[in-house]
């Protein structure tokens, strides 16, 4: 018992660091968005006519993008929801440079009525590094 009293701060740090390590796993479990790789994205495009949503900033988008991608930066996603309203019945694959910003887009897409939401794991960089087609 004296160990706990003398080292309560150490135990608090231990608990909080463990919680921070587990949080991403819990967050992914309850997220409306599923992570998919390049192969699964290609399958979604070819079989289910998936919508590709590029949430990078304009300068990044102009440097290259996935074929036929719709460009709406993450910062404008809520204000430009009307542009995506007619596409809610199709699966949507959001991507950014590495997959971090697109993960944040999942909640906004769910609020817009999308139910089949995917995040391109590794983002545009993974797609391009795999030698898959890009548009300039």
Image (cartoon, grey):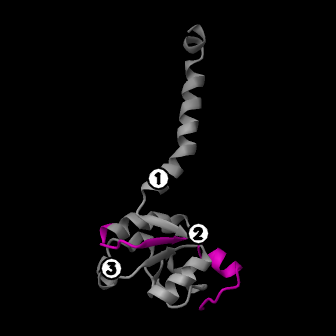
> For the residues marked 3 and 2, what is the alpha-carbon distance in whole angstroms?
21 Å
Q: Position of residue 62 (x, y in %)?
A: 56, 86
The answer to whether residue 9 is left or right of residue 116 is: right
| 112 falls in the magenta region | yes
| 115 falls in the magenta region | yes
> For the residues marked 1 and 2, what is the alpha-carbon distance in whole angstroms?
16 Å
Q: Tell me which residue sits at (33%, 79%) in the image.
A: 88
Q: Position of residue 46 (x, y in %)?
A: 52, 89
Identify the element where label 2 is drawn: loop
Q: Which residue is mark 2?
A: 121
The answer to whether residue 101 is left or right of residue 110 is: right
Tell me the quarter of the picture where residue 86 sits: bottom left
The one nearer the camera, 128 or 71, is: 128
Tell me the quarter of the picture where residue 90 sits: bottom left
Bounds of the magenta span?
111-136
Mark 3 residue crowding within 10 angstroms, few (<14) / some (14–19) / many (20+)? some
The one nearer the camera, 57 or 6, is: 6
Identify the element where label 3 is drawn: loop
Indicate which disc, 3 or 2, sits on the residue closer to the N terminus. Answer: 3
Q: Is residue 61 above or below residue 33?
A: below
Q: Which residue is mark 3?
A: 88
Indicate which disc, 1 or 3, sits on the residue closer to the N terminus. Answer: 1
Instruction: Locate the C terminus and report the quarter of the image it occupies.
Output: bottom right
């Amino acid at each position: 018992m004296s160990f706990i009293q003398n080292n309560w701060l150490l135990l608090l740090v231990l608990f909080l660091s463990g919680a921070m390590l587990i949080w991403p796993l819990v967050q992914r479990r309850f997220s409306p968005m599923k992570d998919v790789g390049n192969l699964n994205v290609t399958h979604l495009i070819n079989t289910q006519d998936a919508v590709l949503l590029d949430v990078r900033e304009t300068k990044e988008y102009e440097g290259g993008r996935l074929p036929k991608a719709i460009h709406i930066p993450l910062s404008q996603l809520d204000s430009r929801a009307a542009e995506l309203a007619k596409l809610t019945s199709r699966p949507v694959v959001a991507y950014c440079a590495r997959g971090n910003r697109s993960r944040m887009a999942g909640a906004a897409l769910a609020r817009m009525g999308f139910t089949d939401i995917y995040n391109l794991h590794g983002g545009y960089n993974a797609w391009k590094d795999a030698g898959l087609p890009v548009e300039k």
